[in-house]
């Protein structure tokens, strides 16, 4: 390489570093190629690269309100003129090729399109909703299912998924709880990173690598009152401690895009928040990719009362650090003029375009714009038997056994007559969950089919609806009671329809609908051994006939193999090992409720007085089923807690061990959890915080020592002044089977010696 060229390249690399770009993924020549393009692009073409529009080449039923261009011909014309850089939410190779042909062969600069979509928990093979799968507490499983989703999505002409959702959900009224990993920061961070790794695979340039987009940046899960699109008023310490780490983990795992949240934080909408999108995200967190707005969120700055009009909204969003505007078309409409009039510097635009082109380059689109647009792959890689098998495995691993007096598991070869009652017995419309709109509803296995398939004598299963999801049906309860009387065991399939959770599905009450509660109560009065199968996208407050059943299983929305996965658990082919990623409160009114809450100055103590204590007058402020809770068909005990040292020196770690023993009669798996509590700190600390977990599978009678390493980093928190700090002092440690109880120990962290 001659000297001049080398100087140019190092200059470019320096400018790329300044833009925070994914340099590791790019060769110097590619950096130069992007820069050359930027030099040749008109401002309109630049604004085009920064524009993402719904894909009307491959129409489907959009999950969003209609906006933008809805017409294939007009969209084609926009692509031809270089006025679009990304299409989203269409699938199918033929349509994608059509769009890519226009971009690559008919637009002036031939820049390939990025094709994005919401593949949240599956394309055609639907895996459990992310919240359900989080019950596995298992990053390896989440990585495997994300990989399978990527294999399918990229075979259907997609390059990027708007997932995983990295929002920590602190309020179960918020409908989007279903899309994330629940209420805990450590679990969410771990699973976010695993999902990013799974989606993207080892090599971004491979045809089956799907770019990830951890969203919604940030604190979207902290909206006041759980109200969707609502406002967040939060201390910076909590923001940093609870809501940023899952994003840090996602970026650390290699995610090159993120999406700004719809919501405002402390009076500034995230979409216009430069402190958030530039100072924090890039300068502090070192994010190297590009930022999407959420759907029309830039335009919504006007309704927020933050921008004067659409033009002002585009200006604010781009200056804040939103690189790609989704669906409003505001960037293509206003950026050229905003630059001409000097309201937005060209340098800001160039940085954003460079980020976008670098990501396209990093995934090999410039060399091969036809990657992930292969008809043969579309035929062979989607809805494969291997993916179905994985969906079944993930489904069973997502089920949480909340209570069981021994009625479960049932014997598949048994002579007992089973009455399967409820609106979700043969229902196929609510198997997948709210964010699986590419799946074919007919392809899912319902509960009745799954149970029958597992029984030696399927005629022993009677099915009665009893009621509809929201309404009673004529004679429904009578028929259900009659069936219950004639049966030896009752299985009640109850819960939420899939449109009761997800985006824009905040609820004031997190209970199962009244018609179903009435059915459960009537059936409970028959006093037959009863198992409840709950279907739901959030934690629920359970009552009476549901709460008092002999066994209760949290089964979320399990996807394509729901019925088979449930049958695997009910009949004991698979031992339940799921743990709750969200606390189930006693009452809806306890929300926001999460296990890592503060002590307060007047905590209640076991068997102590409840007068003048921090509790509701009508209920204890505890959980019916705590975070981390989940039973097995076998029984585990933990003993022998040992710390390698009760003193932790500043730069040393401590090993915590405990022995887990399977004292039951079956093989089973337990998720051993380690929690800490900082007794005295300069900012009050939660009563418990999950720090470590490990899944252990044991044969009856077998025991194993579980080993965790605890270091100063695990004891840190965001102190006054917004800095991560560790403070010397005493820490409680629990090794247990949920966020309550467990073996207790103590470690003291000592300040560094001078
Ligand atoms: C959601 C995003 C989603 C986008 C595109 C928005 O309404 O908030 O999570 O990725 O739509 O479908």
Image (cartoon, rainbow, N blue to C red):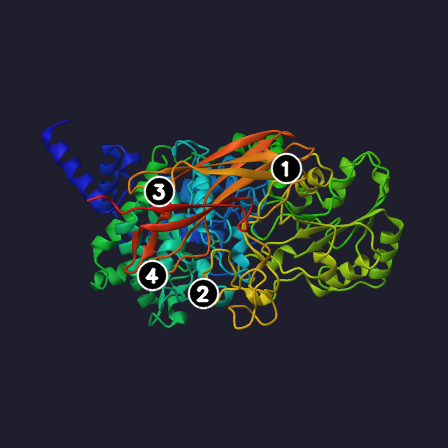
* Mark 1 and mark 3: Cα distance apart in space: 46 Å
Image marks 1 and 3: residues in contact by CB distance under 8 Å? no
Q: Give the mark nearest the N terminus, 1 or 3.
A: 1
Disc 1 element: helix
Q: In the rendering, at what x and y percent does residue 311 appear?
A: 32, 66
In this rendering, the label closer to the viewer, 2 or 3: 3
**Residues tagged 1 and 2 counted as in contact (Cβ below 8 A):** no
Q: Residue at x 31, y 56 (%)?
A: 277
Residue position marked by numbered label 4 in the rendering: 236
Up-down relation of residue 329 to residue 566 (above or below)? below
- Image coordinates of residue 618 in percent, x first then y, are 61, 70
Report the residue marked by disc 2: 600
Tell me the CA gap for discs 2 and 3. Answer: 28 Å
Q: How far from the left and from the top, in percent, is residue 434?
A: 58, 53
Where the C terminus falls, by quadrant? top left
Is residue 400 visible to us here?
A: yes
- Give the Cα distance between marks 1 and 2: 43 Å
Evaluate whether residue 98 shows in this view: no
Q: Is residue 167 above or below residue 225?
A: above
Within 8 Å of ligand 1, the CB of disc 1?
Answer: no
| Of callouts 3 and 4, the N-terminal one | 4
Mark 1 vs mark 4, foreground winner is 4
The residue at 46%/61% (across/down) is 599
Determine the secondary structure under disc 3: strand
Contact check, label 2 and label 3, Cβ < 8 Å = no
Q: Residue 647 carries which label?
A: 3
**Residue lying farthest left?**
3
Figure quadrant of the N terminus: top left
Q: Is residue 32 left or right of residue 330?
A: left
| 3D distance between C-alphas at marks 1 and 4 | 41 Å
- Counting from the top left corner in percent of width and height, residue 390 is at 59, 34
User: Camera-side residue: 606 or 585?
Assistant: 606
């Amino acid at each position: 390489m001659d000297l001049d060229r080398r100087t140019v390249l190092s200059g470019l690399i320096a400018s790329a570093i300044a833009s925070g770009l994914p340099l590791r993924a790019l060769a110097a020549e590619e950096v130069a190629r992007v820069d050359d393009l930027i030099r040749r692009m008109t401002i309109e073409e630049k604004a085009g690269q920064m524009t993402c529009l719904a894909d009307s080449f491959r129409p489907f039923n959009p999950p969003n309100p209609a906006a933008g261009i809805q017409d294939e011909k007009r969209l084609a014309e926009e692509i031809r003129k270089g006025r679009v850089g990304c299409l989203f939410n269409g699938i199918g190779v033929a349509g994608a090729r059509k769009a890519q042909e226009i971009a690559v062969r008919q637009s002036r600069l031939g820049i390939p399109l990025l094709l994005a979509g919401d593949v949240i928990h599956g394309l055609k093979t639907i895996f459990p909703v992310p919240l359900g799968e989080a019950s596995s507490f298992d990053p390896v499983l989440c990585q495997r299912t994300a990989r399978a989703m990527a294999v399918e999505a990229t075979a259907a002409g997609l390059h990027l998924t708007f997932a995983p959702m990295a929002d920590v959900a602190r309020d179960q009224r918020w409908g989007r709880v279903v899309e994330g990993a629940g209420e805990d920061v450590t679990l969410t961070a771990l699973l976010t990173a695993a999902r990013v790794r799974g989606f993207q695979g080892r090599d971004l340039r491979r045809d089956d690598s799907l770019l990830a987009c951890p969203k919604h940046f940030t604190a979207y899960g902290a909206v006041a009152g759980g109200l969707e699109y609502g406002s967040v008023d939060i201390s910076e310490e909590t923001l940093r401690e609870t809501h940023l780490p899952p994003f840090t983990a996602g970026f650390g795992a290699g995610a090159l895009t993120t999406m700004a949240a719809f919501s405002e934080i402390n009076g500034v909408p995230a979409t216009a928040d430069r402190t958030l999108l530039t100072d924090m995200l890039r300068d502090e967190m070192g994010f190297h990719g590009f930022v999407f707005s959420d759907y029309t969120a830039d335009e919504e700055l006007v309704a927020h009362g933050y921008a004067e009009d659409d033009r002002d909204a585009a200006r604010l969003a781009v200056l804040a650090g939103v690189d790609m505007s989704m669906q409003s078309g505001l960037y293509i409409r206003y950026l050229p003029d905003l630059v001409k009039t000097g309201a937005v510097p060209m340098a800001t635009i160039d940085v954003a375009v460079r980020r976008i082109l670098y990501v396209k380059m990093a995934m090999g689109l410039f060399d091969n714009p036809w990657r992930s647009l292969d008809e043969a792959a579309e035929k062979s890689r989607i809805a494969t038997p291997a993916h179905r098998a994985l969906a079944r495995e993930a489904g069973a691993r997502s089920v949480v056994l909340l209570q069981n007096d021994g009625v479960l598991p049932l014997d598949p070869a048994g002579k007992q007559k089973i009455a399967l009652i409820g609106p979700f017995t043969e229902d196929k419309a609510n198997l997948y969950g709210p964010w699986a709109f590419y799946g074919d509803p007919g392809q899912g296995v319902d509960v009745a089919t799954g149970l029958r398939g597992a029984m030696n004598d399927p005629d022993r299963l009677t099915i009665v609806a009893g009621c509809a999801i929201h309404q009673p049906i004529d004679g429904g309860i009578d028929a259900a009671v009659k069936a219950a009387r004639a049966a030896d065991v009752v299985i009640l399939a109850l819960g939420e329809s899939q449109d009761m959770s997800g985006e824009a599905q905040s609820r004031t009450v997190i209970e199962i609908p009244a018609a179903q509660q009435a059915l459960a109560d009537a059936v409970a009065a028959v006093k037959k051994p009863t198992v409840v199968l709950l279907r739901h996208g959030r934690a629920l407050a359970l009552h009476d006939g549901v709460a008092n059943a002999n066994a209760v299983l949290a089964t979320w929305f399990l996807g394509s193999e729901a019925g088979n996965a449930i049958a695997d658990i009910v009949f004991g082919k698979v031992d339940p090992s799921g743990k709750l990623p969200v606390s189930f409160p006693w009452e809806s009114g306890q929300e926001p409720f999460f296990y890592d809450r503060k002590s307060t100055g007047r905590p209640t103590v076991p068997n102590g007085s409840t007068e003048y204590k921090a509790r509701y007058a009508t209920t204890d402020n505890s959980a019916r089923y705590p975070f981390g809770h989940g039973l097995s068909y076998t029984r585990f005990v933990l003993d022998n807690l040992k710390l390698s040292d009760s003193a932790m020196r500043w730069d040393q770690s401590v090993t915590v061990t405990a022995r887990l023993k399977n004292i039951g009669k079956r093989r089973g798996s337990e998720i051993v959890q380690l929690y800490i509590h900082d007794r005295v700190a300069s900012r009050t600390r939660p009563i418990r915080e999950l720090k470590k977990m490990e899944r252990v599978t044991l044969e009856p009678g077998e025991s194993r020592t579980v080993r965790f390493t605890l270091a100063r980093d695990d004891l840190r928190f965001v102190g006054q002044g917004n800095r991560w700090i560790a403070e010397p002092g005493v820490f409680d440690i629990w090794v247990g089977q949920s966020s309550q109880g467990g073996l207790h120990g103590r470690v003291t962290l000592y300040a560094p010696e001078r």
